[in-house]
Amino acid sequence: MVAETAPIACSLSGGKMQDRISAWQAVLADVEVREEIPTGGRLVVRLGRAAGRGQPERRRERAQAQPALRLRRGHRATVSPKGVVRRLVDDDMNGRDFDLLNELCTPQLAPKLRTAFEQFVAAFPDWRQELIELVAEGDTVVARFRCHGTHTGAWQGLAPSQRTMKIDEVYFFRLADGRIRGAWGLEDTWTRMRQLAGDDVTLGELGSLSDGIRQ
């Protein structure tokens, strides 16, 4: 195989194998039959011509011209402010992909959040942020969380208690150029501390007024 070519998977069988090869050749101008194999023929196509789509450089240039963030490894797309915060919760906080902070946050904020998250995980290894509500206005996103975790490491002067906590939190995230640049939040720390101390405190005892319907 020469340097300008790369293999593609193509399984052809049956009496019409040659007809199918010809059909592929009509679509893929640079396809050649390199060898016969037990299940049919092995084909190759020049790089950048797979499926006749071509122009990968132009597609890359268009993608790079848009503000974009990684959705999954190897995929890129424009992401809304809400989408950025969802990624922070799903992939970073709950998925423990702390390297992702360098992509989602500004260079000044990323190391600060990483330190805070790593310290919290050390105290609550099963820490999980349940996203209850997400509201956005411009480049500001407000998130209401339910924070869960089991206290197995020292935290805030408390020795490991092996007790669980579940409290409410609200955070304001401010973004600039598609990245989180600041976070300001309120946490029901009093309820958390009482739960870790062994008091029978249920979620929402110190919460807000409502119509009585639990969310």
Image (tube, grey):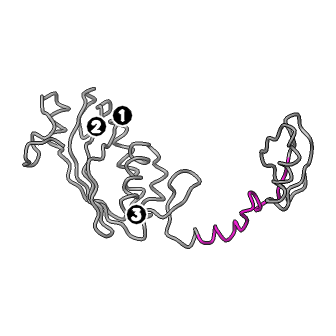
Q: Which residue is mark 1?
A: 126
Q: Secondary structure at mark 3?
A: loop
What residue lies at 9% left-to-right and 43% top-to-bottom?
A: 206
What residue lies at 44% left-to-right and 43% top-to-bottom?
A: 96
Q: Earlier in the sequence, mark 2 or mark 1?
A: 1
Q: Earlier in the sequence, mark 3 or mark 1?
A: 3
Please say if 127 is above or below 88.
above
What is the number of the mark on residue 80?
3
| Residue density around tag 3, few if under 14, some if 14–19, many if 20 or more, within 10 Å | some
Q: Amino acid at mark 3?
A: Ser
What residue lies at 86% left-to-right and 44% top-to-bottom?
A: 42
Label 2–label 1 contact, CB within 8 A? yes
Q: Earlier in the sequence, mark 3 or mark 2?
A: 3
Count the labels in the image.
Answer: 3
- The answer for how far apart the CA atoms under marks 2 and 1 are is 8 Å
User: Taking 167 as reference, is 207 left or right?
Assistant: left
Q: Which residue is mark 2?
A: 148
What residue lies at 12% left-to-right and 28% top-to-bottom?
A: 200
Q: Position of residue 199 (x, y in %)?
A: 12, 29
Q: Is residue 53 magenta?
A: yes
